[in-house]
Amino acid sequence: MLRYIKLREIPELKTSAAEWFHSKWGVPQEAYLECMDAYLNNKTEYGWYLCMDNEQIVGGLGVIENDFHDRKDLAPNVCAVYTEETYRKQGIAGNLLNMAVEDLRSKGITPVYLVTNHTGFYERYGWEFLCMVQGDDEPEMTRMYIHK
């Protein structure tokens, strides 16, 4: 049975979560740990959300100030959205997105942004295309979405 958690609920998962996100996106594990520590130490309300199948992380995402793009004024940003391939098409990413948006909204943090090259996926969960942004060290512009 799948369960959805905020990292604050099981902070002992921090290291394994940072390793898991690093393995999916190639961003240094230390960067994830830094953001997770800020969240766990209540220095930010920008959280980390996981889907667990027993003790295994099968999906996750985070919320950070800026997801490596030039629009520093558009914050916070959902980042690192990932679901293990064998668990896709079960609504996991959508549940995690909704969980993050609702958690942030309950803390007065709205709107929320994300950057992606996907079209059609995020719209299913209430996200709207906002504009194109320039990703750090990327030659092509990237789509930015907003959730109000």
Image: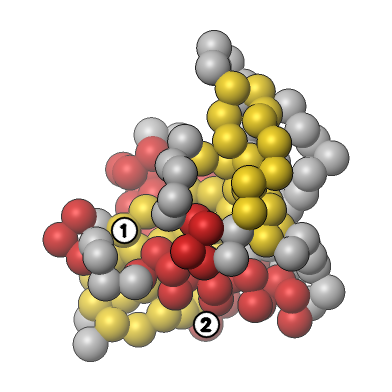
Q: Quadrant where the N terminus lies?
A: bottom left
Place of residue 14 in the rendered image (x, y in percent of width and height, measured from the top left) = 46, 63
Mark 1 packing: few (<14 Cα in 10 Å), some, or many (20+)?
many
Mark 2 packing: few (<14 Cα in 10 Å), some, or many (20+)?
few
From the viewer's side, name the closer residue of 118 and 58: 118
Secondary structure beneath dot 1 equals strand
The residues tagged by marks 1 and 2 sit, at their Cα atoms, a distance apart of 20 Å
CB contact under 8 Å: marks 1 and 2 = no
Furthest toward the bottom, the residue is 1
What residue do we see at 75% from left, 81% from top?
106
Q: Using the rendered image of the protein, determine whether residue 16 is visible from the camera's viewpoint.
A: no
For residue 28, the mark is none
Q: Taking 72 as reference, is 11 above or below it?
A: below
Mark 1 highlights which residue? 83
Secondary structure beneath dot 2 equals helix
In the rendered image, which quarter is residue 74 located in?
top right
Q: Nearer the viewer, mark 1 or mark 2?
A: 1
Relative to 35, 97 lies left or right: left
Name the amino acid, label 2.
Glu
From the viewer's side, name the closer residue of 138 and 58: 138
What residue do we see at 52% from left, 82% from top?
9
Q: Quadrant where the C terminus lies?
A: bottom right
Q: Earlier in the sequence, mark 1 or mark 2?
A: 2
Q: Using the rendered image of the protein, determine whether residue 130 is visible from the camera's viewpoint.
A: yes
Place of residue 128 in the rendered image (x, y in percent of width and height, measured from the top left) = 63, 54
Q: Taking 86 as reference, is 98 above or below it?
A: below
What residue do we see at 67% from left, 29% from top?
133
Mark 2 highlights which residue? 9
